[in-house]
Image: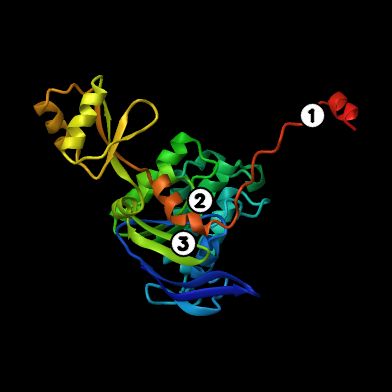
Amino acid sequence: MIELEGLTKRYGEKVAVRDLTFTVRPGIVTGFLGPNGAGKSTTMRMILGLDHPTTGDVRIDGTHYERLRNPLTRIGALLEAKGAHPGRSAYNHLLCLAQSNGIPRQRVHEVLDAVGLTAVARKKAKGFSLGMGQRLGIAAALLGDPRILMFDEPVNGLDPEGIHWIRTLMKSLAAQGRTVFVSSHLMSEMALTADHLVVIGQGRLLADTSMTEFIERNSRSYVRIRSPQRERLLDVLHRAGITAVESGDGALEVDGSKAEHIGELAARQQVVLHELSPRQASLEEAFMRLTAESVEYHAGAPAPPRRQWGESWKKG
């Protein structure tokens, strides 16, 4: 379990994290979301004692990180894909970590095999691709067989097979009763992986809730309808007190109604329907809606196309 209480971090006048209080519980995958600059990486660094909070407290199973004996056996973390010394082989990198944390040498072979790096175990890390570096970082996180695991952007650089593998791994770790805390910008992947969400914006806590409840609270659900008898359908809905709006492609959208109710209305009036589908916004849409006021870095309009050299010369 990871517990944060009133966690605040200042860098001069800049407040990177402001009064964060939440708990990451075992047995589920907890997703950690926020726009760029929200304070996610700073928060994770404070959990691991790499940065010290200005105020507040963070504990790992009731203990501060710096007081943990053999910390890799308590919490494993991936914060940077290139965390290994470039001149060391994957095997020697993990062996060094194992020896400093009282972990048997055999465990190095086990985690290399688990992440698919056995064939390149003796190769130096400087020759690794980003995806291979991610796998090595995950191996280091798993090395001590810890009860708590923390991953920052774990699928960066991974191919589809690798993404599926890490998703399955995180779910299996949570199913074993471990605490799994993962940050990612890939909303589609997070929607498939996380059970619970912690969302921050500009250093502040915006949400701490289940995936299902987060999407329901921060998105629009509606029913999409298409019919060749469109005007008659509109009349039937109007008489039932149901407001429909045009979607722009000939279909109608109705908020706050169940598809079954609309289908029964249409059937009673013998209105033909070509489509009757309930729609729920995606995690990405819900996230964008909640964090719209917390985005620190906004992209501008696309740059205009460059003029040809001759045209530029003529126009001075």
Work out whether mark 2 precedes mark 1 in sequence or the reverse, and give the earlier one. Answer: 2
Give the residue displayed 39% in from the left and 49% down from the top.
Answer: 286
Q: Report the residue at 41% width, 45% height from top.
A: 285
**Dot 2: element:** loop
Which residue is denoted by mark 1 in the rendering? 307
Colour scheme of this structure image? rainbow
Q: Dot 2: few (<14), some (14–19), or many (≥20) neighbours within 10 Å?
A: some
Q: Which residue is mark 2?
A: 153
Tag count in the figure? 3
Q: Which residue is mark 3?
A: 200
Does residue 102 show up?
Answer: no
Residue 314 appears at what percent x and percent y?
A: 89, 26
Left or right of 188? Residue 245 is: left
Q: Residue type at mark 3: give it.
A: Ile
Tell me which corner region of the image, top left, top right, bottom left or bottom right, holds residue 221: top left
- In the image, what residue type sits under mark 1? Arg
